[in-house]
């Protein structure tokens, strides 16, 4: 199948609407990463998402709606703090998990009783979602396990030939996926860290906890147990402060004739002298914005990506570190592939 890449215009949105309501998949920009959308009311369309991505069928999808969509058509809003969070952070990079009213098809929620809902703030996403006026269920628009896409070209690399249309809304400004927050209980609980931080949520909701996933737990956010964000080359990760060890691995690899690339924060860049080292940024937001494109460029240019963890922690650093740790295996703890 031919995959069109079109900028977001009235005509392309009309085509996207026709395709989506006709049961096809459409890739759309958001302010976090690109999503691969299907009509959440159409079980056959939703099944295509799992097939095209190679996604495990027990990993549910996020339903995306425009800002004027009434959430209580889709979900039970049982806690008042969820309304306050909606006021404060929607539209934006926050996904809230509610008990579902069952309208979005069971294929999208893998038979579960909850539904994750997000209202993107990206202008292109909003135009498309307003035009279709149905919940668009969408995972990140990459092949399962691969690095999430932050440009239309990234989507094409993974899904070109498999879907009819990619709406091109430019580079995603946020760069890591939305914060996933369980709001079904008395205290909101972060299932996946992102740009809306624990501190920001607690300041509005009064409190916020972070889910701890332990071996044998009933997993509430199934996605966390799968391989994710992995570049197609060898990888090694070092703690902040271990720049010497990272440089030694780089030198050894280059001496063996391998192309190596170091990814680090701006502060650490100077420790690597003339080596091929790229700064991801000087703070957590910059690192989030650059991480996935650096991994995608890195897998093409290098045989080994060596990442050094940022020194900071808390806030958006939690989301950056979470993605980095899944993308890049800790050095010495076994090969990733
Ligand atoms: O920023 C984002 O969230 C992007 C854009 C496209 O919106 N989407 C995204 O989707 O990252 P995906 O499918 O790659 O990740 C969704 C995460 C997974 O970890 C999944 O397990 C979790 O959200 N999730 C979805 N529905 C859930 C539910 N009902 N309960 C708990 N976790 C859920
Ligand atoms: Mg994903």
Image: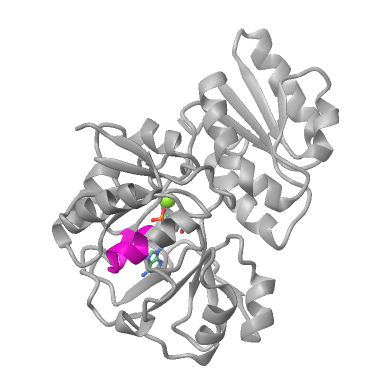
Residue 108: x and y in percent read: 26, 63
Q: Quadrant of residue 159?
A: top left
Residue 294: x and y in percent read: 60, 34
Q: Nearer the viewer, residue 302 or 76?
A: 76
* Image position of 21 (left or right of 62): left
How many numbered marks appear?
Answer: 0
- Residue numbers of the magenta segment: 128-137
Q: Is residue 206 above or below residue 180?
A: below
- Residue at left 32%, top 52%? 13
- Residue at left 59%, top 13%? 258
- Residue at left 52%, top 79%? 86
Q: Nearer the viewer, residue 91 or 199?
A: 91
Q: Is residue 331 above or below residue 126?
A: above
Q: Is residue 31 magenta?
A: no
Residue 63: x and y in percent read: 35, 66
- Residue at left 44%, top 35%? 154
* Image position of 41 (left or right of 100): left
Q: Is residue 136 magenta?
A: yes
């Amino acid at each position: 199948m031919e995959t069109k890449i079109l900028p977001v215009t009235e005509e392309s949105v009309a085509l996207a609407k026709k395709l989506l309501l006709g049961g096809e998949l459409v890739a759309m920009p958001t302010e976090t990463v690109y999503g691969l959308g299907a009509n959440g009311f159409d079980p056959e369309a939703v099944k295509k998402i799992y097939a095209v991505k190679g996604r495990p069928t027990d990993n549910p999808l996020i339903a995306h709606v425009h800002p004027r969509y009434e959430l209580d058509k889709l979900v039970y809003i049982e806690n008042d703090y969820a309304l306050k969070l909606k006021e404060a952070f929607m539209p934006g990079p926050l996904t809230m998990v509610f008990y579902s009213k069952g309208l979005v098809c069971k294929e999208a929620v893998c038979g579960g009783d909850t539904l994750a809902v997000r209202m993107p703030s990206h202008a292109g996403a909003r135009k498309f979602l307003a035009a279709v006026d149905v919940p668009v269920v969408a995972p990140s628009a990459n092949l399962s396990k691969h690095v999430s896409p932050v440009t239309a070209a990234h989507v094409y690399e993974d899904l070109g030939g498999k879907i009819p249309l990619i709406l091109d809304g430019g580079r995603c400004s946020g760069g890591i996926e939305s914060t996933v927050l369980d709001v079904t209980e008395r205290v909101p609980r972060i299932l996946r860290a992102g740009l809306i931080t624990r501190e920001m949520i607690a300041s509005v909701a009064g409190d916020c906890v972070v889910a701890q996933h332990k071996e044998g737990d009933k997993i509430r956010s199934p996605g966390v147990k799968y391989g994710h964000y992995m570049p197609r080359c060898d990888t090694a990760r070092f703690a902040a402060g271990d720049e010497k060890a990272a440089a030694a691995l780089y030198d050894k690899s280059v001496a063996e004739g391998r192309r190596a690339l170091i990814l680090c924060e701006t502060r650490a860049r100077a420790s690597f002298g003339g080596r091929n080292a790229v700064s991801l940024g000087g703070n957590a937001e910059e690192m989030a914005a650059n991480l996935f494109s650096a991994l995608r460029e890195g897998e093409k240019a290098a045989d080994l990506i060596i990442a050094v963890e940022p020194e900071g922690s808390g806030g958006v650093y939690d989301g950056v570190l979470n993605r980095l740790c899944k993308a890049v295996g800790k050095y010495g703890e076994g090969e990733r592939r």
